[in-house]
Amino acid sequence: MASEDVESAVQAALEQAEREFLEQRAARADSVTDLDADPDERAVEAALRPRSMDEVIGQERVREQLSLVLDAARSRGRTADHVLLSGPPGLGKTTLAMIIASEMSAPLRLTSGPAITHAGDLAAILSGLNEGDVLFVDEIHRMSRPAEEMLYLAMEDFRVDVVIGKGPGATAIPLEIPPFTLVGATTRAGLLPGPLRDRFGFTGHLEFYAAADLDLIVQRSAGLLEVGTVPEGTAEIALRSRGTPRIANRLLRRVRDYAQVRADGIVTRDVARRALELFEVDETGLDRLDRAVLDALCRRFGGGPVGLSTLAVAVGEERETVEEVAEPFLVRTGMLARTPRGRVATPAAWTHLGLAVPASSPFSDHGTLFGDGEPTG
């Protein structure tokens, strides 16, 4: 088979695997800045993904290191070392996994940690691999412990032991598997057991993107979507994207809708501002839930400290939603602090809401952030 035919077959396989994987990802978005989307949104996101390392914008250090690993493996004619990608959601871990498979001209198999509940599930996946295949496991930290222990041997010796029977009569049958490359993605690298983490030949941590890089990403996506833009318009979207490409692309599509329906179709700064105001995304990227948390913390509880469960009830959300969706960005922007006594609003939060920092605030000259006593509210 000619090399062009091989590349076409690999690309077709990658696109099919990507479609199947995206269909399995979690469902609906509650706001425009949520990191999960409905099927139509995910299909558009898939079309906007970079297809090669040269198309990737930002993450220069990880990109350079990973390119070196892949180039060395290709020059030796060997499969690439196992790769662990860590970092917050929406920064491109899945995209890099697909690029690794493309760069190595290898088929890609996609699954996720929660889907591997038994060692038998993993054995079935591994036994179906061919030499050089790339296996991508998203949320690898959520894999079951028996499957993790089986993965140790598979990563190191390319072998799994399948246990037949139970009790004293159980027999372990060794099953050889061809060399493959495992790409694991995790948002919580600290939850990975040390033995599993140490078996990855390369570990890359993805950082939040600078506004300048996000601006380039928005411009690239606008070109693919055939959206008319001006530099000030794309810059405005980038500034409100929380340092996350997935959010930037989603905001671009909502601003495009606004520009087509209520403007002349061109994304200018004014159009972007009016569109994002309509979708409740403010100048710093805060959405409805973020502002509700800050408003409850400052107006109802005097800036805290207040417990997470109490705060969740105050905004009408689940505790996990507040902790995992709103809090990380509020902490990163310096508007909320986690203390042993509870959540506390910082002066930046009061300022953002247009309120004066009260004397009773833990961050005021008279407040004691780590003082004795029980939290009020």
Image: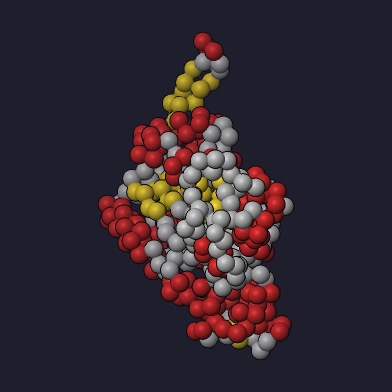
**Residue 134 image offset from top left, x and y in percent:** 45, 49
- Identify whether 144 is placed above or below 283: above
- Pick the front one: 107 or 47: 47
Residue occupying the point 54% across, 59% down: 359
- Pick the front one: 78 or 204: 204
Colour mapping used in the image: secondary structure
Residue occupying the point 43% across, 74% down: 212
Q: Is residue 73 left or right of 96 when viewed as pictured? A: left
Quarter containing the N terminus:
bottom left
Q: Is residue 169 left or right of 353 when viewed as pictured? A: left
Residue occupying the point 62% across, 59% down: 298
Q: Is residue 213 left or right of 76 when viewed as pictured? A: right
- Pick the front one: 316 or 261: 316
**Residue 185 image offset from top left, x and y in percent:** 47, 49
- Identify whether 251 is placed above or below 316: below
**Residue 72 image offset from top left, x and y in percent:** 28, 55
